[in-house]
Image (cartoon, rainbow, N blue to C red):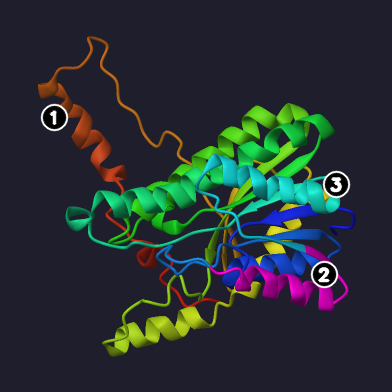
Amino acid sequence: MLDDKVVVVTGAGGGIGRDIALQCAAQGAAVVVNDIGASVAGEGLDSGPAQQVVDEIRAAGGRAAASTDSVSEPVSAGRIVQAALDSFGRIDVVVNNAGILRDRFFHKMGQDEWDAVIKVHLYGAWHVSRAAANHFKEQGSGAYVHMTSTSGLIGNFGQANYAAAKLGVAALSKSIALDMQKFNVRSNCIAPFAWSRMIGSIPTDTPEQQARVARIQQMTPAKIAPVAVYLASDAASEVSGQIFAVRNNEIFLMSQPRPERSVHRSEGWTPESVAAHAMPALKSAFYPLDRSADVFCWDPI
């Protein structure tokens, strides 16, 4: 499905990104495997993970090049896209997958923990997407696949930085889809459910927590890759601005905010009439303080 395509996959040294890179290559793409080799918290540098995936692809007869530049700064993100141009002469797809975690409850979260996560997830998606945009515009084609999360789309404990970044990525994707539609450029999101080192720190102190982790471990990163490959391909030419969730063998189309209910008063509103009329009328449609696990409460299929 990706013959003659050149695909950049960020955070591709392991987990979801690695499987996306491998499946893109298996479908005929030349792949830039980008990964700085950092820890889950974003610390340290290691060129090994990216090169190992490149070696796997080449051993299977595919084409690949390694990139160890960071997505979090515009100059280094630009070098990731340039690596595709230098190695393969063009760029057709960007998969924004790179990520880190600095989980902490909101009232305890520090500025450094907020900044680090926002820079990799939201700024990273912006920097790499923007670096590719003019090339997509000039060639009249291109596709973006961004990783969002139900932590942002729905909610979760202790992830204000990650949730804010991931909901921002969904909005960024929609804006790209709108702004670049006239150039035949598409942009979509995937919210993945998969066991990886990004969620490997989930506690297993109780039988309930152990059962939850056992369910998550069924959902391997390889389950995410087919949807990403499809969205990167010309078969998805009419799919843009959408948010999908993938959980084991399930694919979901996620909702996007739309008006739910409305009230009006011809004479306008006062704070008192808002309290007496508007909120009681709207209250039955309020959303509960759900977390992702509350909404996806059944075992993965």
Describe the element under mark 2 as helix, strand or loop: helix
Residue at (47, 45) in percent of width and height:
122
Work out whether mark 1 precedes mark 3 in sequence or the reverse, and give the earlier one: 3
Instruction: Kindly identify which numbered label has been placed on residue 275.
Output: 1
Instruction: Kindly identify which numbered label has been placed on residue 26.
Output: 2
The answer to whether residue 235 is magenta is no
Residue at (30, 90) in percent of width and height:
207
Direction from residue 72 to residue 163 in the image, left or right: left
Work out whether mark 1 precedes mark 2 in sequence or the reverse, and give the earlier one: 2
Q: Quadrant of the C terminus?
A: bottom right
Badge 1 vs badge 2, beta-carbon distance below 8 Å:
no
> Nearest the camera: 184 or 129?
129
Other residues around mark 1 within 10 Å, as few (<14) / some (14–19) / many (≥20): few
Amino acid type shown at disc 2: Ala
The mark closer to the camera, 1 or 2, is: 2
Other residues around mark 3 within 10 Å, as few (<14) / some (14–19) / many (≥20): few
> Nearest the camera: 130 or 42?
42
Which residue range is magenta in the image? Answer: 46-64
Describe the element under mark 1 as helix, strand or loop: helix
Residue 78: x and y, percent? 64, 42
